[in-house]
Image (cartoon, grey):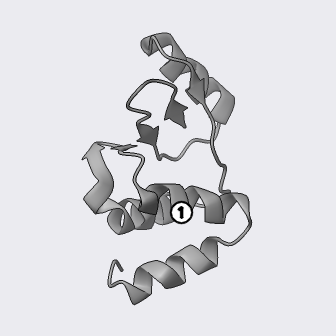
Amino acid sequence: MRQQSSDGYIKIGFSIKVASRRNALQTASPYKIEILALLEESRIIENVIHIMLKDSKITGEWFYPTEEVLRCIECVNNNEFPVFIQEASERGKI
């Protein structure tokens, strides 16, 4: 999910009820929250993504919209998540 503000911070997290989670975040944010990508995986994959993107982490599940974070989103949306994993592995991120 992304906050539509000048900073455009991106939240990467696990949720069973995505719409409810987005709505809860929206209540707490003055900026529109949009879902950028959905990956039907487990909390383990969420943790792996957080490790791979640790250089872009702000706090908790919030990340700066760096090139690497945006590449992860692109791969998820193009059904190429294994490609992102391979790229991260080649860069020594995992």
Screen quadrant of the C terminus = bottom left
User: At 29% across and 50% down in the image, what residue appears?
Assistant: 57
Residue 56 coordinates in the image, percent (x, y):
31, 54
Q: Quadrant of residue 36?
A: top right
Vertical position of residue 56 compared to residue 89: above or below: above
Vertical position of residue 21 compared to residue 29: above or below: below
User: At 63% across and 36% down in the image, what residue appears?
Assistant: 35
Vertical position of residue 87 compared to residue 50: above or below: below
- Would you name the residue on which mark 1 appears? 71
Badge 1 crowding class, 10 Å Cα cut-off, few under 14, some 14 to 19, many 20 or more, is: some
Vertical position of residue 10 compared to residue 44: above or below: above
Kindly state the secondary structure of the residue where label 1 is placed: helix
Query: Looking at the image, which is closer to me, 51 or 42?
Result: 51
Which residue sits furthest right?
79
Residue 75 coordinates in the image, percent (x, y):
63, 66
> On the rendered structure, is 50 left or right of 45?
left
User: At 52% across and 78% down in the image, what residue appears?
Assistant: 85
Screen quadrant of the N terminus = top right
The total of numbered circles placed on residues is 1
> On the rendered structure, is 24 left or right of 17?
left
Residue 27 coordinates in the image, percent (x, y):
50, 11
Amino acid type for the residue under numbered disc 1: Arg
User: At 26% across and 60% down in the image, what residue appears?
Assistant: 55
Which residue sits furthest bottom?
90
Residue 25 coordinates in the image, percent (x, y):
49, 22
Q: Quadrant of residue 18?
A: top right
